[in-house]
Amino acid sequence: MKTSIETIDFQGIEALCLNGPRGSRAVVAKRGGQVLSWTAADGRERLFLSDRAVGDGSAAIRGGIPVCFPQFAALGDLPRHGLVRTREWQVGGRSCGDDYAMVTLLVEDDAASRALWPHPFRAEITVGLEADRLDIELGIDNPGDSPFQFTAALHTYLRVVQVEDVALEGLYGFTYRDAADGNRQRRETGTALLVEGETDRIYQDVRRPLLLQAGNLSLGIHAEGFPDVVVWNPWVERSAQIPDLPANGWRHMLCVEAAAVHRPVAVAAGGSWSGRQTLVVL
């Protein structure tokens, strides 16, 4: 089966469908430049997308891989998770080969963004699909005359059968800020992170790949350029407070996010930055 890229309607959202080798598939929304679905060659969906997700642009789409820029969460004066999640992105390029499909989308500043954050910028997301691998790269250009700083993340919602049964390895020894416990600074002492309640952690300066042990749905997770890792699961009570998340949504998701949060990224006038997250089926 040849690889291809086509424009589709995905649950009412205009999107690009990457048809990759051996039946792999990824769907990228033009709104937000957001990956909504990733099915590897084994035919199993690897991303969580809420069945209550809002796709009309009035709110960010809950699930998949949202792009957070130029602010992560509420760590600043901008809207939560920044300015680009509900914007329409333009297709910058697409290509296919025997063993891959790739698409690039981009978004630039405008009067509305500058009213909130007074910097010219260009954000570009490149999604590359192989049979058992998904690469997502975020690039930020500063075409202006002054430097700027930002925080960012690829807010990856991974689909799991039961979050209580998974283990995330690779974080031992790293310091994290625990937002679920008063933003206390702690050091990870476990060889594997188990989700046993609300989890909202920013691990700092993580220097090794991660392994999500989830039975026969295990994934290798690797980041380049993003120094931090955010791990989030709202658990029962917090999930009930999120209107676009079903009551049992917490059980079937775990966010493992490539992030630059602990220290804002500085981009000089005329400069650029990029970061990548790679997900590999094991």
Image (spheres, rainbow, N blue to C red):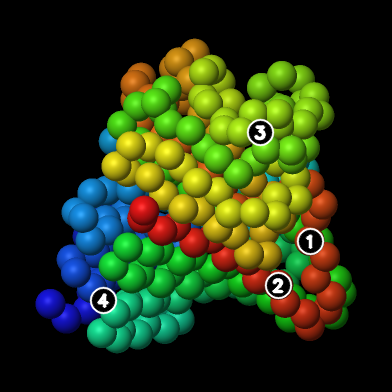
Residue located 50% across and 46% down the image: 211
Q: Position of residue 250 (x, y in %)?
A: 41, 26
Q: CA distance from mark 1 to mark 3?
A: 19 Å
N-term mark: 1 or 3: 3
What amino acid does circle 4 point to?
Answer: Ile
Q: Residue furthest top?
A: 237
Q: Quadrant of residue 80?
A: top right
Q: CA distance from mark 4 to mark 1?
A: 33 Å
Q: Position of residue 124 (x, y in %)?
A: 55, 72
Q: CA distance from mark 2 to mark 4?
A: 27 Å
Q: Residue furthest front?
A: 191
Task: Inspect this view and state whether residue 55 appears.
Answer: no
Relative height, residue 196 to residue 2 (above, below): above
Could you tell me which secondary element the residue under label 4 belongs to? strand
**Numbered badge on residue 273:** 2
What amino acid does circle 1 point to?
Answer: Val
Give the camera-side residue of 68 and 207. Answer: 207
Query: Label 4: few (<14), some or many (≥20) within 10 Å?
Result: some
Asked if the residue at tag 1 contacts the one at tag 4, i.e. Cβ–Cβ closer than 8 Å, the answer is no
Residue located 70% across and 41% down the image: 203
Residue located 72% across and 77% down the image: 272
| Residue assigned mark 4 | 5
| Residue assigned mark 1 | 265
| Residue assigned mark 3 | 201
